Image (cartoon, rainbow, N blue to C red):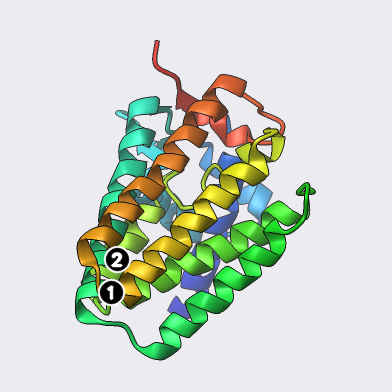
Amino acid sequence: MNDLDAGSQAFKAQLRLREMILAGELAPGARIAELAIVDKLGVSRTPIRAALMRLEQEGLLETMPGGGYAVRIFSEREVSDAIELRGTVEGLAARLAAERGVPGDLIEQAHVCLAEIDAVLEQPALDDGAFPRYDDLNRRFHSLLSDMAGSSVIAREIDRVVRLPFASPSGFVIVQANSPRARDMLIVAQDQHRQVLDAIEHREGARAEAIMREHSRIAQRNLREALASRDLERMPSVRLIRARA
């Protein structure tokens, strides 16, 4: 196997292991049995070890005193802090975008994305198919905001923070699928999307930054609701979070 093949297998193993952890297939706190993973995924130990190392760097796994890895358990405060960090970094990106100016094609892409979100939210009641569509578009809009800053440094840091467990813009969107206020909350989030884009277009840096920091508060609310409902069927990854005593 050449280095390219090994790297590809490690990446695929990383994705699959992440899915297994977030789907609850690997119990919180459980030691990872390397040989069992090798058998389950059908790849050699070398890419599995590389995948485990990357997941430890992401924060989903932790190293054990005697060697090896275990599925990490997160405190509610850790998840809340990660969401707060995302709001801070995205706020910085929005401010820089407003202050520096943004190419017209990026602004147009953002408007198109928001129009597609509007189309999803036009439904009087959102079905199960609408939430994945919203999730994809929401991630797309946040990615465009990152690009608008025109900074590889900021883009790298945003990419790093959204990879923190549960800190992505859509980390808890599925929680809203069970809420009678689901559509209302998504409309509030969409209004904030439009407001931050307006602030960027009008070169209002402080306003753009404040909106994005406030925008992350919705994720904080979803975190609290996810922990209160403990709906493990729809969000098995909630098993990984230990609520405040």
Q: Write the residue at 53% across / 24% down.
A: 227
| Mark earlier in primary sequence (1, 2) | 2
Q: Amino acid at mark 1?
A: Ala
Disc 1 secondary structure class: loop
Q: Are marks 1 and 2 in contact (CB under 8 Å)?
A: yes
Residue tagged 1: 149
Q: Write the residue at 44% across / 69% down.
A: 143
Can you give x and y, in whole percent of width and height, for residue 43 in the image? 60, 59
User: Would you call the spot at circle 2 few (<14 residues within 10 Å), some (14-19), or many (20 or more)?
Assistant: many
Q: Write the residue at 52% across / 68% down.
A: 140
Q: CA distance from mark 1 to mark 2?
A: 7 Å
Residue 28 visible in the displayed image: no
Q: Is residue 29 left or right of residue 213?
A: right
Residue 47 visible in the displayed image: yes
Can you give x and y, in whole percent of width and height, for residue 188 in the image? 52, 48
Can you give x and y, in whole percent of width and height, for residue 137 in the image? 59, 65
Can you give x and y, in whole percent of width and height, for residue 37 in the image? 59, 45
Residue tagged 2: 94
Q: Is residue 86 left or right of residue 181?
A: left
Query: Is the residue 9 above or below the residue 41 in the image?
Result: below
Of residues 148 and 17, which is closer to you in this image? 148
Q: Amino acid at mark 2?
A: Ala
Q: Going by the picture, which residue comes out furthest to the top?
A: 245
